[in-house]
Image (tube, rainbow, N blue to C red):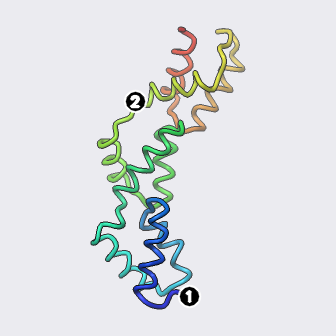
């Protein structure tokens, strides 16, 4: 049990040292181990000192997941579950612009071997894969049609 403000702050800093975290993530991880009022004070202090930033977390998460081949819809949903609002999502996109169409095409080329143009069952399976990774139907269609053109 974390009883003092210093203990809570140190526990939060240890978590932040591993990777960027959102405020909500820290609240969930530390909430059961300490007083809620002290936790909010510690998180406010960490934000004021620059250790905790939801905007920095959103940008870092976007870079990481986009690099792993996830699309914008999946990343945005994940960020929402982590307590990041639409305004910070848009700010992260403005700072780290991503060509989602090109990224979907690159993922399709890495993931799938060329297939005959009339094999609609395979095409539909690939569409489901790409949309499941968070790409819009337009982005997935572009990726598969660009792959067919080569």
Q: Which residue lies at the image location 41% right of the left edge and 79% below the top edge?
A: 9
Q: Residue 94 carries which label?
A: none
Locate the C terminus and report the quarter of the image it occupies: top right
Mark 1, secondary structure of its residue = loop
Mark 2, secondary structure of its residue = loop
> Earlier along the polypeptide chain: callout 1 or callout 2?
1
For residue 107, what is the image quadrant?
top right
> Where is residue 62 drawn, in percent x and y?
43, 46
Q: How many marks?
A: 2
Q: Which of 61 and 36 is in front in this view?
A: 61
Q: Nearer the viewer, residue 128 or 104?
A: 104
Q: Nearer the viewer, residue 144 or 65?
A: 65
Q: Which residue lies at the image location 49% right of the left edge and 38% below the top edge?
A: 67
> Where is residue 141 drawn, in percent x and y?
53, 22
Q: Which residue lies at the image location 45% right of the left edge and 26% below the top edge?
A: 101
Q: Which residue lies furthest to the left in this view?
A: 48
Q: Name the residue under label 2.
A: 99
């Amino acid at each position: 049990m974390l009883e003092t403000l210093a203990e809570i702050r140190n526990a939060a800093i240890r978590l932040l040292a591993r990777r960027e975290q959102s405020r909500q993530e820290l609240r969930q991880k530390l909430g059961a181990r300490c007083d809620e009022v002290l936790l909010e004070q510690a998180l406010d202090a960490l934000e004021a000192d620059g250790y905790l930033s939801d905007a920095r977390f959103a940008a870092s998460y976007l870079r990481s997941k986009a690099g792993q081949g996830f699309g914008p819809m999946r990343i945005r949903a994940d960020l929402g579950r982590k307590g990041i609002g639409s305004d910070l999502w848009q700010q992260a996109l403005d700072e780290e612009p991503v060509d989602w169409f090109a990224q979907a095409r690159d993922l399709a080329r890495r993931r799938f071997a060329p297939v005959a143009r009339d094999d609609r069952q395979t095409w539909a399976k690939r569409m489901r894969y790409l949309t499941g990774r968070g790409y819009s139907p337009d982005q997935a269609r572009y990726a598969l049609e660009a792959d067919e053109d080569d």
